[in-house]
Image (cartoon, rainbow, N blue to C red):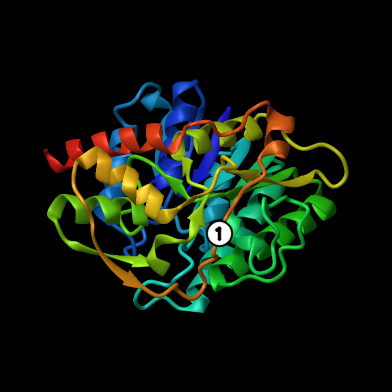
Amino acid sequence: MRVLVTGAAGFIGHHVSARLLARGDAVIGVDNLDPSGDVALKQARLARLGTLPGASGFTFHPVDITDGPALRALFEASPPEAVVHLAARVGVRPSAGVTARDYVNSNVSGFLQVLEQAGAARVRHLVYASSSSVYGAGSVPPFQEGAAADHPLSVYAATKRADELLAHAFSHLHGLPTSGLRFFTVYGPWGRPDMAPLRFLRALREGAELALHDEGRMQRDFTHVEDVAEAVLRVLDRPPSGAPAYRVLNVGRGEPIPVREFLAVMERRLGTRAKVRPTPAQPGEMAATWADPSELERQTGFRPRISVEEGLAGLVAWFLQQAGA
């Protein structure tokens, strides 16, 4: 199968591309290598894809999904059979210089371009990244896909909910099969350096002070990236049926833990104690996320299984190898 993967140089996109190549699919990788992120890390992920099993099936195109003509030309030159859309402006808290307009441009306008091209190409299935943050205020844990999800706490969450609504419209109007995956706090090797797991590991190794929001009481349903990649492939292979051919699914373990407990596992693995600086809870952050993965399991026979202990053992080993320790 020829699969177009947007955000192929990103954290989840890298792992999904690797899994697709390993099973013999051809991957049409798309990424604009946005300089607001770690470009060197993105390039390293792309370089690694060129060394993995099935690498001959990988092609890379430095295309911005908001560039309609360029994206259309790519779809016409290399028609995909399916699309995995992972490119996005990420983070519930904007980084320096990032505005609400940037989120809307990338996550809503960019997604609309992908929807239009996927519909015109009549792909068999479009799988796209949503987020646990869409549940927002008032959601009752464990979060179930049927919840209203209409009180977002961040612009990022609002754009991801908008994506789900746009996908429903395209599925209804054009018969495009779409699946939105609500990812819950993804972590693992080759992750984003601005996210808590790698920030914590750097601070622990360097003996530096680390900011711990709300004293680490916030609970997160930490989900390992290999489980996430497996879920993406399982869903990709099983397009939704019915009219409209549309669904959203949670991708999480269903076992939230406090962030402080997550940090404690890292402390044990590295044999050191964190120098914690307590800070207030941040605007846009949910107090807890908790997936109900039963619908994912019912439809695909899979639910994320990698425990935090097992997942962090692998992450710490990778981190130390990268650091040359």
How many dots with numbers?
1
Does residue 51 appear to the left or right of 174 in the view shown?
Answer: left
> Can residue 8 be seen?
no
Quarter of the view holding residue 199: bottom left
Q: Quadrant of the N terminus?
A: top right
Residue 104 drawn at (x, y percent): 56, 71
Residue at 59% across, 55% down: 132
> Can residue 6 be seen?
yes
Does residue 310 appear to the left or right of 247 in the view shown?
Answer: left
Looking at this view, is 288 or 100 the one in front? 288
Looking at this view, is 136 or 247 the one in front? 136
Residue at 46% across, 29% down: 19
Q: Is residue 165 above or below residue 300?
A: below
Outermost residue on the right side: it is: 243
Q: Is residue 49 above or below residue 77?
A: above
Q: Is residue 188 above or below residue 89?
A: above
Q: As shown in the figure, which amino acid type bears the numbered disc 1?
A: Ala
Does residue 284 appear to the left or right of 116 in the view shown?
Answer: left
Mark 1, residues whose alpha carbon is within 10 Å: few (<14), some, or many (≥20)? Answer: some
Residue 171 drawn at (x, y percent): 78, 50
Q: Is residue 91 above or below residue 324?
A: below
Residue at 63% across, 70% down: 152
Residue at 54% across, 64% down: 287
Residue 93 drawn at (x, y percent): 44, 71
Q: Quadrant of the C terminus?
A: top left
For label 1, the SS is: loop
Say which residue label 1 marks. Answer: 288
Residue 14 drawn at (x, y percent): 41, 40
Looking at this view, is 277 or 95 the one in front? 277
